[in-house]
Image (tube, helix red, strand yellow):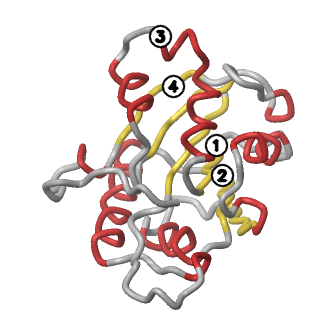
Amino acid sequence: MRQLLLLRHAKSSWDDPRLPDHARPLNARGRRAAGAMGEAMRELGLAPDVVLVSSARRTLQTLEALGPFEDQPLVEPMDALYLAPWSALLETLKGVRETARSVLLLGHNPGLHELALALAGPAAMASGGLAPRRLAEAYPTAALAEFSVALPWRLLEPAGGRLLRFMTPADLPGAEPGEAAEPHA
């Protein structure tokens, strides 16, 4: 069984309107949320072998703020993941080496949210379970979806993952009041 972790970047700063979108950094709240999500991942034993990360500044800073993983994963910053649609994210995952047991894909909405919904599939989304219901509602900044994947990466298709959990920064101890979805990518 393989593990797929889909993490949206943490909250970014809009303080400098002159910065191109790709260069926007995390804000202080985003750094705190990413650090808390990293701690939660360690407590749950979520340690990826491979990290596929968008080359955007905010995704790279999110990865850095997660803190060190127990083992050093192979980290691949990829321009192609920046604001990629879900179908492109799926194709990227199909190219992961078959020996990878656990993959973390760190990216942007709406593509990441749409990928999570596609992987869960309509039956899981209609099941009425708490994780699928929350996933259907929104994919906030620094939110994490964990899937188990039975097939080899190259065969990954829509409805090919089993949603195990969906966590947001608001679920974590010490969450800031009002932590909600960021409407921007």
Residue in the foreground of this view, choosing between 54 and 162: 54
* SS under mark 4: strand
Per the image, the residue denoted by label 1 is: 102
First along the sequence among labels 2 and 1: 2
Q: Nearer the viewer, mark 3 or mark 4?
A: 3
Q: Are marks 3 and 1 in contact (CB under 8 Å)?
A: no
Q: Earlier in the sequence, mark 3 or mark 1?
A: 1
Q: Which of the two discs, 3 and 2, sits closer to the camera?
A: 3
Q: Residues within 10 Å of mark 1 (few under 14, many from 20)?
A: many
How far is disc 2 from disc 4 in space, using C-alphas? Answer: 19 Å
Spatial CA span between label 1 and label 4: 14 Å
Q: Which residue is mark 4?
A: 163
| Viewer-nearest residue: 95 or 97 | 95
Give the mark nearer the N terminus: 3 vs 2: 2
Please determine whether, in this image, residue 120 is positioned above or below residue 90.
above
Mark 3 highlights which residue? 126
Amino acid at pointer 3? Ala
Of marks 3 and 4, which one's residue comes earlier in the chain? 3
Measuring 31% from the left and 62% from the top, which residue is drawn there? Answer: 33
Q: Look at mark 2 in the image and give the residue it sits on.
A: 49
Could you say which disc has been placed on residue 4 in the image? none
Residue contact at pointers 2 and 1, CB within 8 angstroms: yes
Task: Name the amino acid, label 4.
Answer: Leu
Residue type, mark 2 in image: Asp
